[in-house]
Amino acid sequence: MRKIFIAIAVIGVVVVMGFSTLSCTRIDAGHVGIKVNMYGSDKGVQDIVEVSGMVWYNPLTTQIYEFPTYVQHKVWTLDANEDSPQNEEFTVTTRDGLSLSFDVGLDYTVIPTKVADIFRTYRKSLPQITNEFIRTLVRNAYNNTASKYTAEDMVSRRSEYEIQVKEMLSKDMDKGGFIVTQIAILGKIRMPQTLEDAVNSKIKAVQDAIRAENEKQRTIAEAQKEIEQAKGRAEAMRINSEAEANANRALTSTVSPLLIQKMMIEKWDGKLPVYGEVPKLFRSIADQK
């Protein structure tokens, strides 16, 4: 009997020790879980299994990694109060050999079906991949594209520059299993003060020239408008004068002495003048011959 109790106790200890080596975690919605065997025959290319929900594992031989599939936001800035206390700004070299610096903000997502491949490639968590691999892709995209622009172009054609950067970065990150949703320079592009003053002066001169040309064209357009309006008024006066002359000619041609006499009779009140010569109001038909 005693041996039986000893055997049960040993079995109990083994069972307790076995369960004590197990851990449990939950893969939340919006995440893809990766279960990685660190030791044993499964270690290697085939040691990664996607998991979800409640996952039991042995922390001595297995690790669980979670990759969020919702949008990730990352900034690299000069400001020590942002993501890192260190200076993480990007510095690029332009076509004319000048160095410019700026902060960058990136929004991206992980392609859920590529999570296992991503981990097989980098063997790191997503924050580590972001600060190493993705940062390198971002730096290369900005620097390679900057080599096509002068320092002045970087300021005056900034939106065009950023569009080209996004196109290049999107292609590179898609190959790695990521989708770029937004990439942009944060704030102003930093350059030596003397260079910034020169660039701003040149840009202002160009803008002033454009504004002067626009004002000139506006003045010409307004003058032309006045000319056309004057022509229109003159043409209207000419037409009115011709119409009035035609009307007068038509009236003159239709008025006869008899018609005038008839009009006078219609207007006469039947009274003759008291003083002076009485006008001859009626003419005989013989007078008209």
Image (cartoon, rainbow, N blue to C red):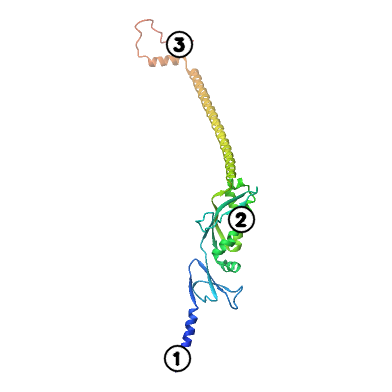
Question: In the visual, does 130 lie left or right of 7?
Answer: right
Q: Position of residue 69 (x, y in %)?
A: 52, 64
Quadrant hosting residue 196: top right
Q: Marks 1 and 3: which is nearer the front? A: 1
179 or 87, nearer to the observer: 87
Q: Count all numbered tags in the image, as a single digit.
A: 3
Percent of width and height locating residue 14: 49, 84
Q: Which mark is residue 285?
A: 3
Q: Label 3, secondary structure: give it.
A: helix
Q: Separation of disc 1 and disc 3 at Cα? A: 165 Å
Where residue 187 sits in the image (x, y, percent)? 53, 50
Say which amino acid is labelled 1.
Answer: Phe
> Label 1: which residue?
5
**Closer to the camera in the image, 102 or 260:** 102
Q: Residue at x 48, y 83 (%)?
A: 15
For label 2, count other residues whose C-alpha is less than 10 Å away and answer few (under 14), some (14-19) or many (20+): many
Confirm or deny contact between disc 2 and disc 1 (CB under 8 A): no
Where residue 88 appears, as percent x and y from the top left, is: 56, 56
Using a 10 Å C-alpha cutoff, classify the residue at mark 3 as few (fewer than 14 neighbours), some (14 to 19) or many (20 or more): few
Q: Find out whether the residues at labels 3 and 2 contact each other: C-beta distance under 8 Å.
A: no
Amino acid on which disc 2 is placed: Ala
When the figure is inspected, residue 162 is found, relative to residue 113, above or below; the finding is above
Report the front residue among 155 and 172: 155
Q: Is residue 123 above or below residue 236?
A: below
Residue that mark 2 sits on: 141
Extreme-bottom residue of the structure: 1
Q: Quadrant of the N terminus?
A: bottom left
Give the label, 2 or 1, closer to the camera. 1
